[in-house]
Image (tube, helix red, strand yellow):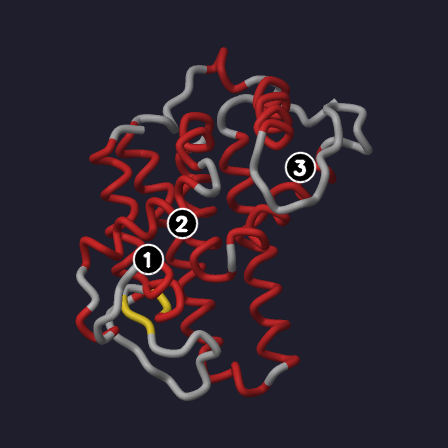
């Protein structure tokens, strides 16, 4: 994925996040472009969150989320999955997003029979990428869609449960759900633009189920 494509993904994420918000029930406090005040301060910003420069927000997303989650490596394998993981990591934390990916890969490994199980530490590294490669080799490149959609579904269930357990968060539940549902379309539209979803029959692998 080139720099222009990566920038397009980050700008689209900032649009989903919206501008300045300071809701009294939001645990993150004041945010702008989805960046919390604590994260902005950690990156040297000392001004009002209302005035956070968009260019700085892009840099924060790139360093703290995209590179931290090794999404350049993920995007080479499955652009839609990288887009989904970025949105999940920003919204709910990079470790939670990473753990969810690892848990799904472990379940689909059939107890380590298809590929080696991964340590569930939330850090996307060599083990996770090797497991993804093994899954794609077995199932074909479009398996990235399976991973992305499965994790999105689990994310929706977790958000609903979070709002059920903590009624103070129910003010945000509809926005959370709308965001994740829209993301499903956005990530596949982007992959279509890159030409990645037009895989040949030879690259699709075994279409009759995992073995």
Q: Secondary structure at mark 2?
A: helix
The image position of residue 58, as x and y in percent, is 26, 51
Image-based side of 100 in relation to 11, left or right: right
Say which label, 3 or 2, has the lower sequence index: 2
Mark 3 highlights which residue?
A: 105
Callout 3 crowding tier (Cα within 10 Å): few <14, some 14–19, many ≥20: many
Q: Nearer the viewer, residue 113 or 99?
A: 99
Q: Nearer the viewer, residue 47 or 176?
A: 47
The residue sitting at 41% across, 72% down in the picture is 175
Q: Are marks 3 and 1 in contact (CB under 8 Å)?
A: no
Look at the picture and state if 19 lies above or below 90: below
Mark 2 and mark 1: Cα distance apart in space: 10 Å
Mark 1 highlights which residue?
A: 43
Mark 3 and mark 1: Cα distance apart in space: 33 Å
Q: Are marks 2 and 1 in contact (CB under 8 Å)?
A: yes
The residue sitting at 58% across, 86% down in the picture is 167
Q: Quadrant of residue 22?
A: bottom left
Mark 3 and mark 2: Cα distance apart in space: 24 Å
Task: State the mark number for residue 116.
Answer: none
Q: How many marks?
A: 3
The image position of residue 57, as x and y in percent, is 26, 57
Look at the picture and state if 58 lies above or below 29: above
Q: Secondary structure at mark 1?
A: loop
Mark 2 highlights which residue?
A: 64
Q: Nearer the viewer, residue 34 or 104?
A: 34
Q: Secondary structure at mark 3?
A: helix
């Amino acid at each position: 994925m080139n720099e222009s494509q990566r920038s397009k993904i980050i700008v689209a994420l900032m649009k989903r996040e919206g501008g300045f918000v300071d809701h009294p029930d939001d645990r993150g406090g004041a945010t702008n472009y989805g960046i919390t005040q604590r994260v902005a301060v950690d990156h040297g910003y000392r001004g009002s969150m209302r005035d956070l420069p968009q260019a700085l927000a892009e840099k924060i997303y790139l360093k703290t989320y995209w590179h931290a989650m090794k999404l350049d490596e993920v995007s080479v394998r499955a652009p839609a999955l990288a887009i989904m993981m970025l949105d999940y990591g920003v919204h709910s934390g990079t470790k939670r997003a990473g753990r969810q990916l690892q848990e799904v890969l472990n379940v689909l490994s059939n107890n380590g029979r298809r590929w080696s199980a991964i340590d569930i530490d939330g850090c996307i590294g060599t083990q996770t990428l090797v497991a993804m490669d093994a899954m794609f080799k077995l199932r074909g490149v479009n398996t990235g869609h399976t991973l992305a959609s499965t994790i999105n579904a689990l994310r929706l269930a977790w958000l609903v449960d979070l709002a059920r357990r903590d009624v103070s968060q129910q003010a945000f539940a509809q926005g959370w759900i709308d965001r994740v549902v829209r993301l499903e379309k956005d990530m596949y539209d982007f992959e279509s633009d890159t030409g990645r979803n037009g895989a040949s029959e030879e690259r699709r692998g075994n279409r009759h189920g995992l073995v």
